[in-house]
Image (cartoon, rainbow, N blue to C red):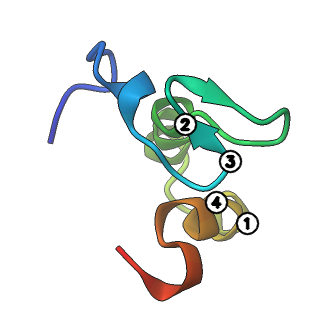
Amino acid sequence: MISLDDPRWPALDHRGWSEGRGAPDAPFVPDELRQLRADPTDGGRFSDLWPYLCSEGTA
């Protein structure tokens, strides 16, 4: 896994995030993963993030 501080993260496209820019409601994946690492029991955060990581059942 790449570091959450790696400068390549903004280049990761997902639903609502492209070319280093996100829609106002699009999460920045490393920030969300940091929060999940701090509280891995936060199922709501994971559920909110999942559609951005696996949009429409794709990976």
- Crowd band around label 1 with a 10 angstrom C-alpha radius: few (<14), some (14–19), many (20+): few
List the residue tagged with mark 4.
Answer: 42
Disc 2 to disc 1, C-alpha distance: 24 Å
Distance between mark 2 and mark 4 Cα atoms: 26 Å
- Where residue 15 sits in the image (x, y, percent)? 61, 56
Disc number lying in front (2 or 1): 2
Residue indicated by mark 1 = 44
User: How far apart, in angstroms, are the residues tagged by discs 4 and 3?
Assistant: 22 Å
**Residue nearest the observer in this picture, 9 or 42:** 9
| Residue type at tag 4 | Asp
Q: Nearer the viewer, mark 2 or mark 4?
A: 2
Foreground mark, 4 or 3? 3
Residue drawn at x 85%, y 32% as measured from the top left: 24
Report if the CB atoms under discs 2 and 1 are less than 8 Å apart: no
Mark 3 → mark 2, Cα distance in angstroms = 7 Å
Q: Which residue is mark 3?
A: 16
Q: Are marks 3 and 2 in contact (CB under 8 Å)?
A: no
Residue contact between numbered discs 2 and 4, judged by CB atoms under 8 Å: no
Q: Which residue is mark 2?
A: 18
- x and y, in percent, of residue 19 in the image: 50, 28
Horizontally, is 47 left or right of 29 in the view?
right
Secondary structure state at the residue bearing disc 3:
loop
> In which quadrant is the N terminus drawn?
top left
Secondary structure of the residue carrying tag 4 is loop
Q: Is residue 4 above or below residue 27?
A: above
Mark closer to the chain start, 1 or 3: 3
The quadrant where residue 6 appears: top left
Amino acid type of the residue tagged 1 in the rendering: Gly
How many numbered circles does the render carry?
4
| Circle 1 or circle 3, nearest the eye | 3
